[in-house]
Image (tube, rainbow, N blue to C red):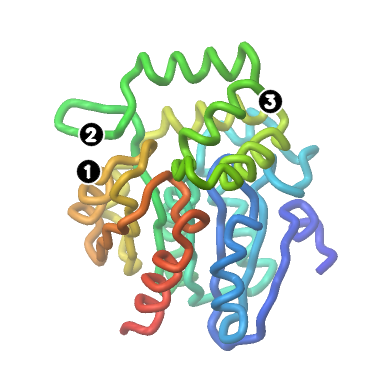
Amino acid sequence: MNSSIARRHNVNIVGKGSQTLIFAQGFGTDQTAWRHQVATFGPNYRIVLFDHVGAGDSDFAAYSPHRYSTLHSYAEDLLDLCSELKLTHGTFISHSVSGMIGLLAALAEPKLFNKLVFVGASPRYLNDTGYVGGFDRSDLDKLYAAMSSNYYAWASGFAPLMMGNPERPELAAELAKTLIAIRPDIAQAVSKVIFESDYRQELPQLKVPTLILQAQHDPAVPVEVGRYMSQKIPKSQLIEIDARGHFPHISAPEKITQAIASYLSSR
């Protein structure tokens, strides 16, 4: 592919199946985070991989803090990508913030997607009255201050905390590498967009069948968040995964892959 949209998002297409899977990464990673799932599904599905603007090998020049001040712009990018590739009736498989990007895209164009899969997604990270999001305001203020003070030091400490699985330090090192590859100004701006967002009101409007995969020991998204979404999204199914960390598709890939495979084969 050589279109401007494909270059902007570093689009890669693998596999030649009749069904399409679109994978979207969470903050701090790029499309390579899905390599385990791609290896499994590649022989039987057409797989679309891309990087959000500002991450991975996307066109960093396309990023502006004004345009990407809400997740709606990322959803518009996804819709543009689907239009460019003439994608319809695909399955959108997302991690973390990309879950809400998929939600917004599916609300705008529900016929584009047959199914959605959320891995560690959250409609709101900040605790609220009657709602457990995982972070207090003081937690976020400290996070922003640490990112601003010394981004690279912050990334080196944040990666092992979010990845979990301390007995496998190579996983945290991988996450730290992709975090550090992001321009600090972009990382700081995007983190605020993510952590200050609130899409709880949109959840009941979603009509596309949705699988919610929630790690039981996630330092960023408590299990209460997955349960909350399953109560609010009409056609949803929740599976709590016995895994540690916020990146179970990397740290416990076989469990995530098996859950996705079962969901894809179900009616």
- The residue sitting at 49% across, 65% down in the picture is 92
- Secondary structure beneath disc 1? helix
Place of residue 220 in the rendered image (x, y in percent of width and height, measured from the top left): 39, 37
Q: Residues within 10 Å of mark 2 (few under 14, many from 20)?
A: some
Residue hosting label 1: 224
Q: Which of marks 3 and 2 is nearer the N terminus?
A: 2
Q: Which residue in the protein does label 2 denote? A: 132
The answer to whether 63 appears left or right of 61 in the picture is left
- Let me know if residue 73 appears in the view: no
- The residue beneath circle 3 is 184
- Which amino acid is tagged 2? Val
Cα gap from disc 3 to disc 2, whole angstroms: 29 Å
Quadrant (top left/top right/bottom left/bottom right) for the N terminus = bottom right
The alpha-carbon separation of the residues under discs 3 and 1 comes to 31 Å
Q: In the image, what residue occupies the spot 77% across and 39% down? A: 60
| The one of 40 and 109 positioned closer to us in this rendering | 40
Check disc 3 and give the amino acid type: Pro
Residue 47 picture quarter = bottom right
Q: In this view, does 156 lie above or below 146?
A: below
Q: Are circles 3 and 1 on residues that touch, CB within 8 Å?
A: no
